[in-house]
Amino acid sequence: METSRIDNQVPFMAIHPTEIIKDEIKERGMSQKELAERLGMQASNVSRMLREKESITSALAAKLETALGIKSSFWLNAQAEYNKDVLAVEQRNEKEQVAVDKEYMLSSLLNMKELYAKLKIRTSLFVQEKLDALSQIFGMEPAEIPYFQLAYNGNFKKSDNVTTDEKNQRTWQVLAYVSAKHNKPTCKYEKGNAREAAIEIASSAHKGGISEEQIKEILNKYGISYSYVSKLEKAPIDAYSSWVDDYPAIVTTHRYNDICKLVFNIIHELGHIELHIKQNTNVAYISDGAYSTDQKEEEANKFAEDILIAPDIWKDIVNTSSKGIGVNNIVQHLRLQAKAKELDFGLVMWRYKFETHKYALRGTNPEKITRPVKENFI
């Protein structure tokens, strides 16, 4: 029989040698009275030894060897292993209580269930093991994560019409940062690349549609990280941009399965990267789709609008459509304008809706996102 196990592996609980004795006599169909006779002990003393888990001494180990045919060294080693395990379990439990307190603090700020699920950290692990896994992923102590998150809170617009779960919003932002760190671009970012990437994305979209995978490939070519993190309940976020390590990053949510809205959101975030985000700074921009009067948001909106459709072309479309065109005919008119100017009709409609706030305009169905990017954290 062997009692050795992997060094430094702490068992769930310490197993006393008397538990092994109980298993042995049960397996052999032996009563405690018969064992007492073989040990040369009173039955009451054997009963107490098993009940109170008395230590195995050298003398008792020798008797057990005679009674059960198991070497005395086994019983002495089992007792030594038990003593070692008791200490290890006590130390583990002390650390576990500290970890429980840390997790409780984190749970007041973050949705830990979602965080563990997204990062594939098993909930069956000890809390200390789960926090250790978080430390490896983030490269920092778990207790620092909320402070890190606040540092990256930056500027973002929040809709007054949507109820927001602040805990879920913070959790999503933390996940976005992890995803951006994992999805490092293979090319180096140079100043001006955000504008070039925006122009190429818009051009590709107008030439015959664009998939999300194509967008990711274009951004990678310009040294910009792109990833997708699904939205959490009551966290109305469309997109996020920030500087991560030595490159800019964009993360989106697919809150709406609309490729035109996605293209606009990505180019909007490219506007923040081009105009506002400085290298190695911890400011993030989070967009929720609400129209904002914040100066930087307005600048990013204008950047996206002008990249998608040149100002002179858009002015011509708007001026033409305003001359005697009724609401019922505006969709058809914009379709004709898009065809005449070789523009993607969906993007023309999206810009019209965005600028006029007529999002309920009928006559069109949003084009869905094709070849969507998968979530990828580790």
Image (cartoon, helix red, strand yellow):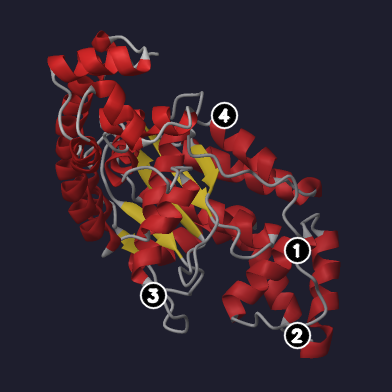
- The crowd level at tag 2 (other Cα within 10 Å; few <14, some 14-19, many 20+) is few
* Residue under pointer 4: 221
Circle 3: element type? loop
State the SS at label 1: helix
Amino acid marked by disc 2 = Lys
* Residue 349, picture quadrant: bottom right
Labels 4 and 1: the sequence-earlier one = 4
Where does label 1 land, which residue? 346
Looking at numbered disc 3 in the image, what kind of residue is underneath it? Thr
The one nearer the camera, 221 or 129, is: 129
Q: Which mark is residue 323?
A: 2
> Residue 260 occupies which quadrant of the picture?
bottom right
Can residue 15 be spotted in the picture?
Answer: no
Q: Nearer the viewer, residue 322 or 106?
A: 106
Estimate the spatial distance between the alpha carbons at disc 1 and disc 3, rounded to whole Å: 25 Å
Q: Are marks 4 and 3 in contact (CB under 8 Å)?
A: no
Q: Nearer the viewer, mark 4 or mark 2?
A: 4
Earlier residue among tags 1 and 3: 3
Q: Name the kind of residue labelled 1 in the image.
A: Gly
Q: CA distance from mark 4 to mark 1?
A: 26 Å
Residue identified by numbered label 3: 293
Q: Are marks 1 and 3 in contact (CB under 8 Å)?
A: no
